[in-house]
Image (cartoon, grey):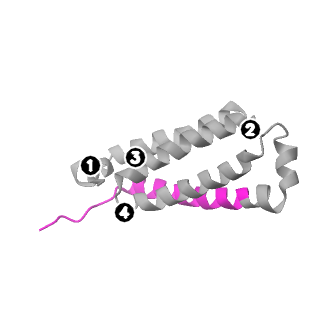
Amino acid sequence: MLKEKQRHGCLTIWLVLLIIGGVLSLIGTAVMYLVDPQLMRETFPDAPGWTVYAMGLISLFSFVFAIVLFTWKKWAFWGYVVTSIASAIVSITMGTPAWQWLLGLTGVVILYGVLQIGGEEKKGWTQLE
């Protein structure tokens, strides 16, 4: 009989926060880039035009990967890592201060960390498929 997977509370909380952050990022992207494109130009005057679309896609994929992690898919973790790195690269291109894109990369470190806690029964990393 297959044993039901158990998720540590910290992992659940972090995944929920990633999903909420993804929703807020999508809303922020829509407002800043689609509803009021002039706001983007004022905030990041030297940013190339393609960064608007790149950040929107990155936000969407990060959100999706966070949701898929709830279904225990390891590829979603790696997808989240790739989108976080891509977000940092685009942020650097936009001229975002280093502390902001570094903060985004710490989310990956925290995610990996919470996947490692929980002992044998609830350790998330070993339960990913």
Count of residue discs:
4
Q: Crowdedness of circle 1 by 10 Å Cα count: few (<14), some, many (20+)? A: few
Of callouts 3 and 1, which one flags the residue occurring earlier in the amino acid sequence? 3
Residue at the spot x=71%, y=56% of the render? 29
Residue type at numbered disc 4: Thr
Q: Quadrant of residue 116?
A: top left
Q: Disc 4 or 1, which lies upstream in sequence?
A: 4
Q: CA separation, marks 1 and 2?
A: 37 Å
The image shows residue 91 at horizontal and vertical percentages of 68, 39
Secondary element type, mark 1: helix
Is 27 within the magenta?
yes
Span of residues in magenta: 1-29
Residue at which label 3 appears? 114
In contact (CB < 8 Å): disc 3 and disc 2: no
Residue 3, percent from left and from top: 18, 64
Looking at the rendering, which quadrant does residue 43 occupy? Answer: top right
* Label 3 – label 2 distance at C-alpha: 31 Å
Q: CA distance from mark 2 to mark 4?
A: 34 Å
Secondary element under disc 4, as helix, strand or loop, is: loop
Q: Which residue is mark 1?
A: 126
Q: Nearer the viewer, mark 2 or mark 4?
A: 2
State whether the magenta stretch is mostly helix, strand or loop: helix
Residue carrying label 4? 71
Q: Amino acid at mark 1?
A: Thr
Q: Give coordinates of residue 5: x percent, y percent.
A: 26, 62
Q: Is residue 12 left or right of residue 47?
A: left
* Marking on residue 94: 2
Q: Amino acid at mark 2?
A: Met
Crowding at mark 2 (Cα within 10 Å: few <14, some 14-19, many 20+): some
Q: Nearer the viewer, residue 65 or 103?
A: 65
